[in-house]
């Protein structure tokens, strides 16, 4: 697992940054536009895992921040995705740790510590079941990553 620098993987916002519509961006790989479009405006981080790329992309909308998580194959086709957000919620992405061989810890919404576990193959999953509050995913019976959330503990001394 390794973090990808912007010279290897980045996004180019399409349209105006002040638009009222859902922002969309084009994937740029090694400085070349790919023609692949994703929802979101700001690439928070990208991580290469084997021959796949995991990207965390936020919308950059004040008081209604949301994050899209995409897992791409070598041709930048989405093989799994999730959306984190809540109406009127503000989120700030913070990468906590890259935990080889296949996990990423991050913070985004509220007092939650999030863990994303990458899976080496398609794994059976029931739609809409066992996802943490605030996580939405496209309908499907297979997943290539799992997301868990745990309330952050504070020292009350």
Image (cartoon, rainbow, N blue to C red):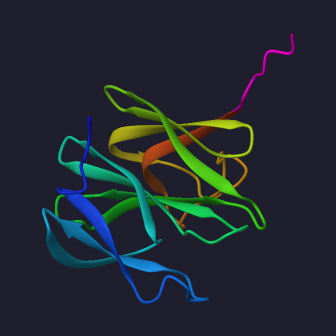
Q: Nearer the viewer, residue 60 or 77?
A: 60
Q: Nearer the viewer, residue 155 or 36?
A: 155
**Which corner quadrant holds the C terminus?**
top right
Examine the structure image and report whether residue 155 is included in the region drawn in magenta: yes
Residue sitting at x 73%, y 50%: 133
Q: In the orientation shown, which residue stands out farthest toward the right?
A: 157
**Image height of 133 relative to 60, above or below:** above
**Which corner quadrant holds the N terminus?**
top left
Question: For this view, does 17 lie left or right of residue 49?
Answer: right
**Image height of 74 relative to 35, above or below:** above
Q: Nearer the viewer, residue 35 or 45?
A: 45
Residue sitting at x 20%, y 41%: 50
Q: Position of residue 147 (x, y in %)?
A: 55, 43
Q: Position of residue 22 (x, y in %)?
A: 55, 82
Examine the structure image and report whether residue 141 is included in the region drawn in magenta: no
Q: How many marks?
A: 0
Residue sitting at x 22%, y 69%: 28
Question: For this view, does 83 lie left or right of residue 132?
Answer: left
Q: Main secondary structure of the magenta part?
A: loop
Q: Position of residue 95 (x, y in %)?
A: 48, 39
Q: Quadrant of residue 103?
A: top left
Q: Position of residue 46 (x, y in %)?
A: 33, 50
Q: In the orientation shown, which residue stands out farthest toward the top?
A: 157
Q: Quadrant of residue 7?
A: bottom left
Question: For this view, does 86 lie left or right of residue 34?
Answer: right
Q: Nearer the viewer, residue 139 or 44?
A: 44
**Image height of 122 relative to 28, above or below:** above
Residue sitting at x 74%, y 45%: 110
**Image height of 55 relative to 40, above or below:** above
- Range of residues picked out in magenta: 151-157
């Amino acid at each position: 697992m390794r973090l990808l620098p912007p010279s290897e993987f980045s996004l180019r916002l399409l349209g105006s940054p002040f638009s009222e519509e859902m922002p969309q961006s084009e994937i740029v790989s090694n400085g070349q536009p790919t023609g692949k479009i994703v929802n979101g405006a700001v690439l928070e981080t990208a991580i290469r895992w084997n021959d796949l790329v995991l990207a965390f992309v936020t919308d950059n909308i004040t008081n209604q921040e949301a994050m899209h998580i995409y897992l791409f194959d070598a041709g930048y086709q989405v093989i799994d995705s999730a959306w984190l957000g809540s109406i009127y919620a503000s989120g700030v992405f913070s990468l906590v740790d890259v935990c080889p061989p296949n996990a990423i810890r991050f913070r985004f919404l509220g007092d939650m510590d999030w863990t994303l576990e990458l899976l080496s193959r398609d794994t059976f999953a029931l739609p809409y079941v066992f996802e943490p509050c605030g996580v939405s995913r496209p309908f499907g019976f297979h997943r290539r990553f799992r997301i868990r959330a745990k309330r952050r503990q504070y020292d009350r001394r």
